[in-house]
Image (spheres, rainbow, N blue to C red):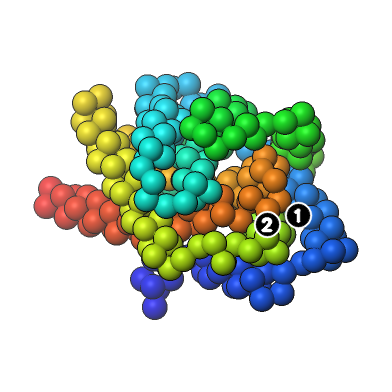
Amino acid sequence: MNRLRQVLDPFLLLLIATVALASVLPARGEGARIADMAADAGIVLLFFLHGAKLSREAIWSGAKAWKLHLATLGTTFVAFPILGLLIGRFGIVPQDMRAGLLFLTLLPSTVQSSIAFTAIARGNVAAAVVSASFSNLLGIFLTPLLVALLMQRSGSGSLISLSSIEGIVLQLLLPFVVGHLLRPWIGGFVTRHKSLLGKVDRGSILLVVYAAFSAAVVEGLWSKVSGAELLALAGLCIAVLTIILLFTLALGRMMGLSREDAIVLQFCGSKKSLASGVPIAGVLFPAAAVGPILLPIMLFHQIQLMACAFLARHYGARADDKSNSE
C-alpha cells in the first residue's frame, strides 16, 4: 500500500475528480463568474505562500554550486523548450494539445517531489533545494516570456496581451514579492503550519482546474477530444520524459559531476511543476483554452512521478549496497 501511494499521487486523484465534476456540473453564467473570481483569489494566495516559503539563505547558498544549477536551469528552460518545439512539428495530436505540450516544456521544475526523490536516491539534498527553488522563482518571469516568444512562433497564437501582463504582475509577481518581504514576520507561522498551508496550496490549484475545465466543457471540450488522442498524448509525454532523463544522465557524465550532484541534475532537470503550471495557465490563456492546455501537464505529472519514484528507489538501493559492501 505504501508503495502504491508513492507511485500514485493522491493529489492527482483529486485533480481527476475535479475534472469529472467540471465535466458533469460545469460552472455556468453567474456560477462561472464566481468560480473565476475564486480561482483568481486562489492564484494570488498560492504565490503569496510561495514567496513566504522561500528562504533567502537558500538563494545565497546556491552560488556555491553554480555549474550544477546552471545545468539544471539550462535543461529546464532551454533543452525542454527545444524538445517542445520539435514535437510540435508533428501533427500526432490536435493543435490545442500541441500547444499544451509546448506550454508544459516551458514550466519550471517541481520543488517538493524533486527534493524528495533526491533524498530517496541518496543525492545532494541541499543542492536540490536550491536548484528547485531557483527554477520556481525564475519560472515566474521566464515562463510567461517563453510563452510570448515560442508559442507565437510555433503557431499557437500570440497569448501575451496587456491584460495578461497585468495579470502576471498582480496575480503572480506582486503576491510573491509581498509574501517574501513578509517572511521575517510570517515565516515561522508558515513553517509551523506547513501541512495546513499545503492543503491551501492544493485547494487553490483545484479551484483553478475546476474553473478552467468548466469553461472548456461549456465550449465542447470532450466532444473535440477522443480516447485515441488522449493515448497519443500520453505516449508523447512518456517520450518527452524519456529523452530528458537520458539527456540529464549524459550531461551529468559529460560535466564530470559527482554521483550526488548528477542525481540532482536528473531529478530537478526532468520535472515540470503542476503547482506552477495551473495558475500560470489561468493567468496567460483565455478561459476556454485552459482546459486543453492543462491536459498534457496533468498526464506528465503522474508519469514523471511514477518514473522518478522507480529511479529514486533504484539509485538509493545501489547506494545502500555500495555503502554496505565498504
Q: Which part of the image, by quadrant, shows the N terminus? A: bottom left
Give the residue furthest to the right: 30
Pick whichever, 32 or 48, lies toward us: 32
**Residue drawn 42% across and 60% down?**
229
Q: Nearer the viewer, residue 124 or 245?
A: 245
Count of residue discs = 2
| Residue tagged 1 | 39
Residue 181 vertical placement versus 112 (above, below)? above
- Disc 2 residue crowd, few under 14, some 14–19, many 20+, Cα 10 Å: many
Give the mark nearer the N terminus: 1 vs 2: 1
> Where residue 7 appears, x then y in whole percent?
39, 66
- At label 1, counting other C-alpha atoms closer than 10 Å, the crowd grade (few under 14, some 14-19, many 20 or more) is many
Q: Is residue 135 left or right of residue 266?
A: right
| Place of residue 216 in the rendered image (x, y in percent of width and height, measured from the top left) | 65, 59
Residue type at mark 2 is: Ala
Q: Position of residue 124 (x, y in %)?
A: 36, 39
In the image, residue 245 lies at what x, y percent?
A: 29, 43
Q: Is residue 143 above or below residue 2?
A: above
Query: Is label 1 in contact with label 2 (beta carbons under 8 Å)?
Result: yes
Q: Secondary structure at mark 1?
A: helix
Q: Residue at x 83, y 54 (%)?
A: 37
Q: Secondary structure at mark 2?
A: helix
Q: Is residue 181 visible?
A: no
The answer to whether residue 175 is left or right of residue 155 is right
Q: Please say whether residue 283 is visible from this viewpoint.
A: yes
Find the distance from the CA under tag 1 to the CA under tag 2. Answer: 9 Å
For residue 172, which quarter of the picture? top right
Q: Which mark is residue 207?
A: none
According to the picture, the residue beneath numbered tag 2 turns out to be: 212
